[in-house]
Structures are given as C-alpha cells and as structure tokens.
Image: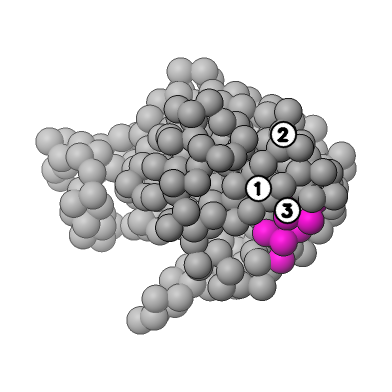
Amino acid sequence: MTRIACFVEKYNFSYSEEAGALQNFKRAAESMGHEFNFMFRNGLSEIPKYDAVFIRATTDPLYTAYVVSKTAWELGLKVVDDPESIRVCANKVHQYRLFEKYDVPRIPTLFLNKEEFHHRTIEEIFELFGKPIVLKAPYTSFSKYVEKVACETSFRDVAKRFFRRSDFIVVQKFMPSRFDWRVGVLNNQVLYVCKYMMPKGKWKHGVKRRGKPSFIWGRTVSLKRDNAPQRLKEVALKACSVVGKGLYGVDIKEVNGDYVVVEVNDNPSIYSGYEDYRNKDIYEKIIKYLTE
C-alpha cells in the first residue's frame, strides 16, 4: 500500500467537474489498494508521513504548491509535479529556449528585454511576424497575461504592463485557429487528447469577461488517444521530453496539416467529463505512476 497525499486548495472544489475528478482519483487509488488523503496548507507538516504527493493546486515557484513539491522531492517521495517541471513550465522564456535548443516544432517566437524596447524594434517585429502579434509575460497560466496587439500603441501599453512582472517578455506570431489541441502526457506516454475550442468570436480558449474578474471558456472536445493524429502525439511527446517525465498538458496548434507547440504546462486541468471523457483510465494510470 502506498500512502498518497493530494495537495489541494479550497478553490479546487469550487467547480463540480474538478471536485468530481478529485474524487475519481481518490476512488481509483483506494480501489488499487492505496491510501489517498487530501492535504491543505495547514497539513504540510504531515508530508513526511506519506510515500507520494500529488499536487492539484495551481503551481508556481512563488506559491505554496511549489513548497510542497520541493519538500516532498527533497524527502525522496514520488511527486507530481516535481519542482524542476514547475520551474521550467513557469518560465516561458526558459521553456522556449529549450524548444529551440532541441528543435521542437513551435510557434515563431522572440524575446524582448527592456533595453530593446523602442520604436525600431517594434517596427522590425511587425515586419517579421505581421499584424497582429501575441505578447506574453514569461510567468503565465490559464491564459492570463497573454494579449494580442496590432499597433505600436497597444504594443507599448501591454509591454509596459508585462515588464512590471519580468525583465523579458515573449513575442509570438499570431496563428489564428478555431481550437488548440491539448495533449496530456505522463512519463513520456500520451494520456489523453482534447480540442480546446475558442469561445465564439474570441481568439484564445480562456477570455476574461469585460469589466469582470471571471473568464469565458470554450468547449472541450475529447478524443480517444488511439484515434488522435500520430504526428500530433509525436510532437507533444518531443516537447515534453525537454521538460521532464512528469504529468503535462501540451498546447498545440494545427497549421497547414502540421503541428506547432504553443507551450507545455505542468499541473494540467483534469475535469470530470472533459479530459477523461474518452479515456476513463487516466486516473488509474496517474495513480499507478505515483505508486511505482
């Protein structure tokens, strides 16, 4: 029997689909003969009592989840997500440099620092990538700090905001699509495949409501992993190979019959009735990985 701690925050239970997935993990673990307990912030002192830690709260090197990951890792526990995966996925500049180094098919990308931020550079970027383009802060999640700009004024406004968060920002070619592929990968194997559809009239999967803190999300269309395009899966696996062997969600765009990586995310969303819809065994596969 393996004792598994699942680190969560209260917000993980705000949506029935995510709460349902968490219960599915618990049922899967217990049916396989393992112990599975939810751990909140006030229970971090209990980490040494477990054999494995599964993190479902939002990961970031500045968040409690990272402290949990690093503590479990240093104690020799099996941990998902591991601290190195969190660091690589949290820093998009570092991640895209790895893609470049290992020749991962990717969206055309540049990095801009504060010293290069002037009129001529902006003109050159528009000449290279066309209009509009996409600007990203290096530390992003759930489509936050990702904006589209089409003129120098909007470029400057967005870049100045993002430079408050980092000395670098990410500049990418805008590649419109009706959906992004999401490929779930665990230990160098495809776990699930989905299409994250864009909300009507929008250009990204998650869009903030005007004047409100909430987001509009597009539909999730799930496929059986065996039926997904082979090239899609190959690109996803290559992208993950430069990050690690943990649990990842790879965002990929389909362009002219081929595939380019948008980014690799640690701690990917797993909601009941969404990512698991065509691949019901993902819970058992993740528990098995934690207990090997």
Residue 162 seen anywhere in this rendered image of the structure: yes
Q: Residue 176: percent from the left, percent from the top?
A: 55, 54
| Magenta highlight on residue 290 | no
Verify CB contact (< 8 Å) between mark 2 and mark 3: no
Give me the disc on residue 25: 3
Q: Nearer the viewer, residue 230 or 13?
A: 13
Counting from the top left corner in percent of width and height, residue 271 is at: 68, 61
Residue at the image position 39 percent from the left and 42 percent from the top: 67
Q: Label 1 is placed on what type of residue?
A: Arg
Q: Which residues are magenta?
A: 20-28
**Which residue lies at the image location 20% right of the left edge and 40% below the top edge?**
167
Rendered image: mark on residue 182: 1
What is the secondary structure assignment of the residue under circle 3? Answer: helix
Residue type at the position of mark 2: Thr
> Looking at the figure, which quarter contains the C terminus?
top right
Q: Residue at x 18, y 51 (%)?
A: 164
Mark 1 or 2 closer to N-term?
1
Q: Quadrant of residue 208?
A: bottom left
Q: Which residue is mark 2?
A: 291
- Badge 3 local density, few (<14 within 10 Å), some, or many (20+)? some
